[in-house]
Amino acid sequence: MEILYNVFLTLHFVGWAVVLGGYLASLRTPGLYTGVLHGALTALVAGIAMVGVGEASVWETWPNGGPDMAKIAVKLTVALVISVLAFVAKRQGSKAADGAVAPGLKHAIGGLTLVNILVAVFWN
């Protein structure tokens, strides 16, 4: 089960890397890359799967019994918000002739992605 947990962890990291990379790559363009939505959904699903596998078997061997569930709840909430915003941005971009997305929407996705990464790293 630890191998499965690590597979989901890798997918989770790749998903957030796609979201952050897609945001940074689109800073000079009016649109937002479609990969941002796909990365957010990948990270969201992989994170949920990690919690399921971790609760089932992996975390019982950890010194503290696994991560703080408040941290998991915060990360889940932020990931859900990012996924919804990415979906809205995709719809907004498909309606505009030049694929433009509201700058506030784009920067909210990038900022919340950074917040989610910081929560993962610094919340013990």
Image (spheres, rainbow, N blue to C red):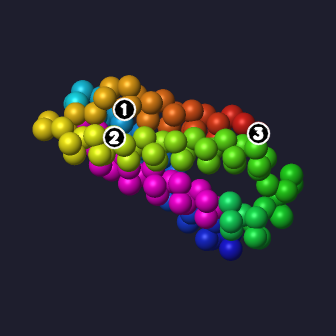
Badge 2: residue crowd in 10 Å (few <14, some 14–19, many ≥20): many
Q: Which residues are magenta?
A: 31-50
Q: Amino acid at mark 1?
A: Lys
Whole-percent x, y for residue 49 in the image: 61, 64
Residue at (78%, 61%) from the top-left corner? Answer: 59
Which residue lies under the disc numbered 2? 89
Above/below status of 111 relative to 95:
above
Q: Which mark is residue 124?
A: 3
Whole-percent x, y for residue 47 in the image: 59, 56
Residue at (68%, 65%) from the top-left corner? Answer: 52
Q: Using the rendered view, name the quadrant where residue 102 is placed.
A: top left
Task: Report, in whole angstroms, how far the alpha carbon at label 3 lies from the one at label 1.
Answer: 29 Å
Q: Amino acid at mark 2?
A: Ala
In-image side of 47 versus 41 (left or right): right
Could you tell me which secondary element the residue under label 3 belongs to?
Answer: loop
Contact, mark 2 vs mark 1 (Cβ under 8 Å): yes
Disc with the residue nearer the chain's start (2 vs 1)? 2
Could you tell me which secondary element the residue under label 2 belongs to?
Answer: helix
Which residue lies under the disc numbered 1? 106
Which quadrant, please, contains the C terminus?
top right
Is residue 34 highlighted in magenta?
yes
